[in-house]
Image (cartoon, rainbow, N blue to C red):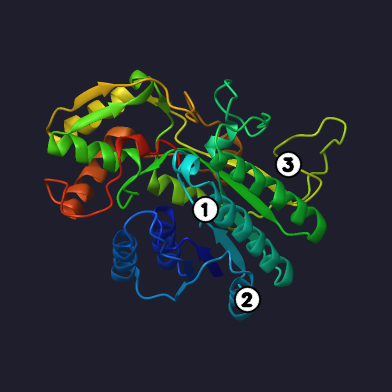
Amino acid sequence: MKILLTGAAGFIGAHCALRLLRDGHRVVGVDNFNDYYDPALKEARVEWVREQAGDFPLLRLDLADASATAEVFAEVQPDAVIHLAAQAGVRHSLSHPRAYTRSNIEAFLNILEGCRANPVEHLLYASSSSVYGANQHTPYSVHHPVDHPLSLYAATKKANEAMAHAYSHLFGIPCTGLRFFTVYGPWGRPDMSPVQFARAISTGQPLQLFNHGQHQRDFTYIDDIVEGLVRLLDHPPSPDSAWDRDRPDPASSMAPWRLLNIGGQSPVELLEYVATLEKHLGQKAQVQLRPLQPGDVLSTCADAGELQQLTGFSPRIGLDEGIARFVEWFRAYYHPDASARSGAVSPGQIALTR
């Protein structure tokens, strides 16, 4: 397939590009290489992919530019689109809200318009476990309502799901929204907890754990995320003939549209997570326990039964193995003192969700 992959220099995007290229797909990547974190990491990811799987076209543009995005679709004529580009980070959205409406709303509208003008077999796009917001019922199911987001980031992801449904209904675009659950692994973002925690532990700096370390997260190793995503390519949704307007299922529709969770299905408390990092780094953390922060979700756990039933996918990499692989990369990229590269953010900016 010819696949347009947005966010190709991002964490999930780079791993996805590598897998698609190895599987023989023709990949055209798009990324704007913004400076939310050090663009050198994005450049290094792209170099890594090309070293492992060969060269591929990578367009450097802002998807919020409607005319430029339209030109890409007209030129590439993709069979499928995997849209992973977004402004990420829950806490960053508290201080930079307009970056989220531009990157997550305007850019996604341009993607939908591209798929409308140049029909594709399947549009897969990144949503987030953060859409579950104030919902306290776990495991999170795509059949649960998600009407109370706790951050603007989450609200933009919920908006993406609604926008995709409208375009699917009006123009027949087969759309799958994937709610990712706390993805981690090599080449992860420097604002996310694995890099921040590993840097603090390695350099003997205080490690702040909010909610007194009692957060629980459904950590999902990057290879498992990519496996589930790639398996879905050949499974575009069809209209659900059993969908009932009087009792509407939030996860399906009379349109070719659906939502799926993709997560490890084994939530871990942050204190256990830190202990696993300590084990593989060979150093103890200087833990400082802090109160809950605004916008944080207490616990996440995915019900990924629909994805497993559809594709046979189930996560394979447990936390211990995943952290071991992450630490190996972390030491190679950042060096043992974890200070050789830029991109650090304050502890208050650590991202626990995608």
Residue type at the position of mark 1:
Ala
C-alpha span from label 1 to label 2: 28 Å
Q: In which quarter of the image is the N terminus?
A: bottom right
Task: Pinpoint residue 72: horizontal percent, then vertical percent.
Answer: 58, 75
Circle 2 — which element? loop
Give the camera-side residue of 8 and 264: 8
Gap between marks 3 and 2 measured at Cα: 27 Å
Residue 201 is left or right of residue 172, and the answer is left
Q: What residue do we see at 34% from left, 69% from top?
A: 53
Q: How crowded is mark 1: few (under 14 residues within 10 Å), some or many (20 or more)?
A: some
Q: Name the residue under label 2.
A: 77
| Mark closest to the chain's N terminus, 3 or 2 | 2
Closer to the chain start, of discs 1 and 2, is 2
Residue 94 drawn above or below residue 246:
below
Label 3 close to label 2 by CB (< 8 Å):
no
Q: Residue at x 32, y 66 (%)?
A: 43
The amino acid type of the residue labelled 3 equals: Ser
Q: Distance between the residues labelled 3 and 1?
A: 30 Å
Q: Which residue lies furthest to the bottom in this view?
A: 75
Closer-to-camera residue (118/319): 118
Side (left or right) of 301 relative to 239: left
Which residue is pictured at 30% across the width and 68% down the height? 47
Q: Is residue 295 visible?
A: yes
The numbered mark at residue 252 is 3
- Which image quarter: residue 349? top left
> Where's the C terminus, which quadrant?
top left
Residue 292 position within the rendered picture, expressed as x and y whole percent measured from the top left: 42, 22
Q: How crowded is mark 3: few (under 14 residues within 10 Å), some or many (20 or more)?
A: many
Give the residue type at disc 2: Gln
